[in-house]
Image (spheres, rainbow, N blue to C red):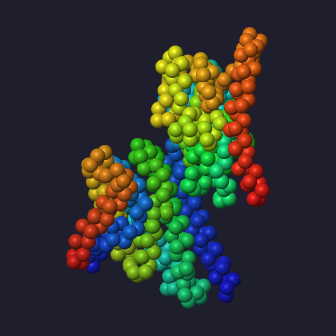
Amino acid sequence: MLDLLLIAIKYSLVSNVVLSQFLGICAFLGVSKKVDSSKGMGAAVIFVIVLASLVSHAIYVVFMAASSPLCKALGLKDGLEYLTTIVFILVIAALVQLVEMFMKKNMKGLYDALGVFLPLITTNCAVLGVALNNVTYGYNFVECLVYGLGISIGFALALILMAFIRENVIEGNDSIPKSFQGSPIVLLTAGLMAIAFFGFAGLV
Amino acid sequence: MIVTFILVAAGLVGATGLILGLFLGVASEKFKVEVDETEANVRAALPGNNCGACGFPGCDGCAKAIASGEAPVDQCPVGGPAVAAKIAAIMGTNASGEQADKKVAYVRCQGDCDKAKQAYHYTGIADCRDLAVVPNGSEKECPYSCCGYGTCVKACKFDAIHIVNGVAKVDKEKCVACGACVKACPKNIIAIVPYKKKHIVSCQNHLKGKQVKDSCSIGCIACGMCEKNCPFDAIHVIDGLAVMNDKCKDCGICAQKCPTGAITGKRPVKPAAPKAPAAAPAATEAKASAPAPAEKPAEQPKDTTSANA
């Protein structure tokens, strides 16, 4: 039980996916302009990462690991690990499509606000990173669930914090030197946030 | 063994794809959203270039705005009246007729190979954007001139702009004023102007009169004749260049008074000839002597380059 708690804390705060592993930066910078849409994006990413983590883990255990029933039946000693990336991408793409359909029907406003970044979750490396790291770290089903939750909550946290900072401090602030306006000041802010999150380092 | 590997790999990925595909198919039935039929029809009637001339991100955005009534049926400048009529039929309204003020792109430079002096021979990448960062930014002596390497030609999706004798020229009939060439031009000399406007300052040179005269025979020398003679206060010399404002009635007095011809639309001086036979030869003589020295040096560098080549 303690292990699970530690995984959750470690990957949401200490090794935050955006601010210390530098995965998923594209969506982090792209959708953090408004707090509302960043919340929606955070929720969508949590959904996709958790489900992708579980489904990809299940597929890995049943079909692709060296110890899986399929590989044993076919006599493949090394398993099918070389196929993980392509199969996981398929799973992620399908899940993102599902989220997109759901949002288009039930949350039209959010769907429009997220725009191109919603389908781009497919290529968000944070999602694929979670699915692949499950294999690398040898997590079991429950650990995969907690790991996916931790990572995605960390992503949502960083995204929403950034959106608050941008909405309240950065957007329309005339005291920012002209050459720093726009993306540069956002990148600097992201750097400062990463340093702040470094403060969690001793926690786990 | 290898065959098994290949078969297993193909089978696994194929099966995963198939299952997910079926799953998505079921889900798409469940989460079906009724697409607005008008919107789909309007979208089908639009040209589909996605050029963005309408001000929306693409044809989809334009179709949505038209279907919801936010935009007029003739929002699409590319399709023109024909498409507007089609969309009007879909929407059940009357087209607002011919576009009131059709606009076209216009290249504000007349410094072709005969009129502008060449400063050097450029042999780099044949693209204006690359030439623009080379010192002087143009092969011609005038740093504000059209480079003539056709970045605008490549940007045009409608085959409406071409390089003629070293200067880009817009085909007014084909141009739809989408502004792609305006964005592409590193010299910022292309502008969107009303189709009917005849008198336009066709020079972007901000340098002093002498420098302009030394580099091009048809540039704006900022003499101020147009400003003094304009009855509508519609043209002013600002920062070494005549600039028209929206008070312009297109009367053409400025073009008549312009000593270099930098303002287009000057009428030929024929009618004056029979009236004052004494004055006419003098005028033509003066005219003949004026362009001559300007033309000669324009040819010289050309000769040297051809000799070098």
Quarter assignment of residue A27? bottom left
Residue B89 in percent (x, y) is at 63, 24
The x and y percentages for residue B12 are: 59, 73
Q: Can see residue A71?
A: yes
Residue at left offset 56%, top offset 89%? A77
- Residue A3's spot in the image, x, y percent? 27, 79
Residue toward you, A20 or B179: B179
Q: Is residue B229 left or right of residue B218?
A: left
Above or below, A79 relative to B21: below
Q: Nearer the viewer, residue A176 or B243?
A: B243
| Residue found at the very far top of the displayed protein | B275
User: In the image shown, does A139 or B102 lie closer to the viewer?
Assistant: B102
| Figure disc tally | 0
Residue B92 visible: no
Q: Is residue B207 above or below residue B134?
A: above
Query: Which residue sits at x=74%, y=54%?
Result: B304
Q: Please name the residue shown 74% across and 14% down the image.
A: B278
